[in-house]
Amino acid sequence: MTDPSRATIAELRDLVVSGRMSASEICKAHLGRTRAVDDRVKAYRSVLERQALAEADAVDRARRESRPLGPLAGVPIAVKDVLCTQGTPTTCGSRILENFVPYYDATCVARLREAGAVIIGKTNMDEFAMGSSTENSAFEVTRNPWDLTRVPGGSSGGSAAAVAAGMVPAALGTDTGGSIRQPAALCGVPGLKPTYGRVSRYGLVAFASSLDQAGPFGRTVADVARILQVIAGHDPLDSTSAPEPVPDYLGGLERGIAGLRIGVPKEYFPAGLDAEVHGSVRAALAAAERLGASIDEVSLPHTEYAIPTYYIIATAEASSNLARYDGVRYGLRAAGAPDIAQLFRKTRNAGFGAEVKRRIMLGTYVLSSGYYDAYYLKGQKVRTLIRRDFEDAFRRVDLLITPTTPSAAFRIGEKVDDPLAMYLSDIFTVTINLAGLPGMSIPCGLTRDGLPIGAQIIGPRFGEDVVLRAAAALEGAMQFRDRHPPLPR
């Protein structure tokens, strides 16, 4: 019988529909896998065992009664702990929301449930999605399943690690500056950031509202496509949700990439790029060429300004969004404050970690009187130039392929005291958040130390179908799926 912890979404659903395995058995298998390895990986903030078994039982009951089964019937899925889940805690990895229980589901979570998915747990993350290593969680440090001394990436490190370790076939993350693609690369799984507006942000606790976007991780590119098919589409509850038609993502996966024009931005292959990353991404480009794609060098000349632009805009929006956590309406409330000003100060000091405080202070500074024009307004102008670079490139090519990260996974603690070094971990990913484009990381090789390397595929606005099509072709050519972390079975 198929090992559920290695099966794809299609294989799991087929087991349920055919009756060869019940949704409850599949759920128990993944819960068992979680019990076996998560004490070392620490991917989860909370495992929703009782709720998950009840949801799986509902799928089995629907099958026995010959009712229609959804496209994700019986498929266990994990959800990043920044997405609201009705009746279960949503902490955002922060003490300030440690006991916050939403009364509604985020739209993308609700759509998963409607499709028959079984929500198995909430995954660990950098506090309020501010980080690149999942070391900034207020609760625990998630570890990379390929090497438990190394980070899984961030901020969606728990979701990526859960998929890589076989605890779930798919998971939801969010991506504000690389927080799906970077951990996908470091954990050796496919992960997609959709176009801004493609997936509803309703119920996604905001970090930077013009940059945040939810998206899927999966065991395979097809798994990612199946999840995106369910969660994509207009939502009237989100004013930034785009009323764009949703293509048949699965139907396009077999089309191959013959005839596609792939651009290689020269700015993404700097002199200091890790040699193993450079070699693996170039090997992926060579595979694309063998499959019939043409490869051309392009330029994105404003790339060098991406990191400072991102950390002006993102921190400014964070400063505004996180002002709501004041100890009055919900979340942590500090005791013993003699007046409202002290209540705010004590609550926020106790509830926020060092990185969140750093970004709030940076954002408040760039928005302050006398500095707004010099920093925030100029950052928005440079953002426009970055977006225009991509628009110019996509007049010449269909896709761009770059490294996802400048190196493979670094060691836990290696960069945590050096914010600039940590921020530079996202140097190849923040640009497409600024431009609002879709991007996906797929595994393209291993280092000599056995650590995954990711290639990033970037598409034009609402071009997820062509991104997924190229990712599926390269996945088949590079045959990474049968490589697994050295965790015991």
Image (cartoon, helix red, strand yellow):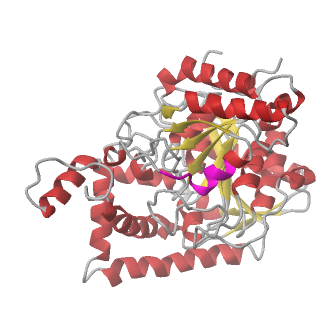
On the image, the x and y values in percent for residue 2 come to 81, 21
Q: Name the side, left or right, on which 362 lies relative to 241.
A: left
Q: Is residue 423 above or below residue 121?
A: below
On the image, the x and y values in percent for residue 304 come to 50, 67
Quarter of the picture containing the C terminus is: top right
* Quarter of the rendering containing residue 221: top right
Stretch in magenta: 103-112
Quarter of the picture containing the N terminus is: top right
- Asked whether residue 122 appears in the rendered view, the answer is yes
Q: Main secondary structure of the magenta part?
A: helix
Seen from the viewer's position, the closer of residues 198 and 451 is: 198
Seen from the viewer's position, the closer of residues 318 and 485 is: 318
Q: Name the side, left or right, on which 18 lies relative to 235.
A: right
Residue at the far left in the pictured view: 338
| Residue at 74% from the left image edge and 28% from the top image edge | 23
Q: Is residue 123 above or below residue 386?
A: above
On the image, the x and y values in percent for residue 43 come to 51, 32
Q: Is residue 18 above or below residue 258?
A: above
Q: How many marks?
A: 0
* Quarter of the rendering containing residue 423: bottom left
On the image, the x and y values in percent for residue 428 come to 56, 57
The question of residue 181 being in magenta is answered with no
- Asked whether residue 481 appears in the rendered view, the answer is no
* Quarter of the rendering containing residue 35: top right
The question of residue 111 being in magenta is answered with yes
| Residue at 71% from the left image edge and 59% from the top image edge | 232
